[in-house]
Image (tube, helix red, strand yellow):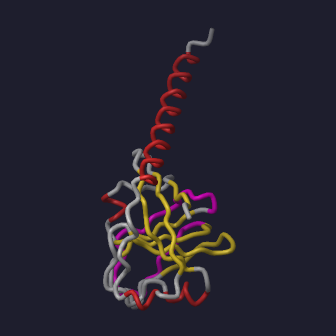
Amino acid sequence: MNPDFGKRQSSSLRALRRGLLGGLLCAICLLAAAAPATAAEPAGYLREFARTRAIIETSGPTCLMLELYLADSPQQHAQGLMFIDRMDDFEGMLFRYDRDATMVMWMKNTHISLDMLFIRADGEIAHIAQRTRPMSTERISSQQPVRFVLELNGGMTQRWSIEPGDRLLAID
């Protein structure tokens, strides 16, 4: 009998339990979702953006329900969160692209600090740029090909221990 077999099995069972617990917590998150967050201010700048809900599943295991504006068109990509003065804690913008690419963002005309999460096509967070500088034209790179960029209030990723390897799960 292989002496490492029991260790691997115990480790596998622990991982399975963690995964099941994480899934259960995410399900509770879905059931506990309250009314939609109030809109970013000033909301008029974002009236052309569709909205959806999504969950970030962290390795904690913690799940965060988010209210997201969807940036799908080139015009929406260019506008992003420019001229927005504030967002609720669990509100953000998801930039969606048709193919994987190394993304480059900036903060021109963006009044609030953001955390930028660069996300692969499978939902895995590849890289995070934390607490970006408002109004800056400094280039912020994904560092590798990704499909999505999620912008949240600056400091959210640190506050909720969101790290590369965590996942964005679509809901609506």
**Spot occupied by residue 172 in the image (x, y as percentages of width and height):** 56, 64
Position of 146 compared to 83: left or right? right
Position of 91 compared to 168: left or right? left
**Spot occupied by residue 27 in the image (x, y as percentages of width and height):** 47, 48
Q: Give the image quarter of residue 84.
A: bottom left
Q: In the rendered view, would you say 171 is above or below 10?
A: below
Q: In the rendered view, would you say 20 is above or below 161?
A: above
**Residue that extends furthest to the right in the rendered view of this protein:** 99
Task: Judge by depth and name the residue closer to the eye, 111 or 19.
Answer: 19
Task: Judge by depth and name the residue closer to the eye, 167 or 54.
Answer: 54
Which residue is rendered at x = 47% and y = 72% of the image?
A: 68
**Residue that extends furthest to the top in the rendered view of this protein:** 1
Which residue is rendered at x = 56% and y = 22% of the image?
A: 9
Q: Which residues are magenta?
A: 121-144
Q: Give the image quarter of residue 12.
A: top right
**Spot occupied by residue 96 in the image (x, y as percentages of width and height):** 59, 74
**Spot occupied by residue 18 in the image (x, y as percentages of width and height):** 46, 36
Q: Specify whether residue 50 is painted magenta.
A: no
Which residue is rendered at x = 41% and y = 91% of the image?
A: 44
Q: Specify whether residue 143 is painted magenta.
A: yes
Position of 140 compared to 84: left or right? right
Q: In the rendered view, would you say 140 is above or below 61?
A: below
Which residue is rendered at x = 46% and y = 86% of the image?
A: 46
Locate the N terminus and report the quarter of the image it occupies: top right
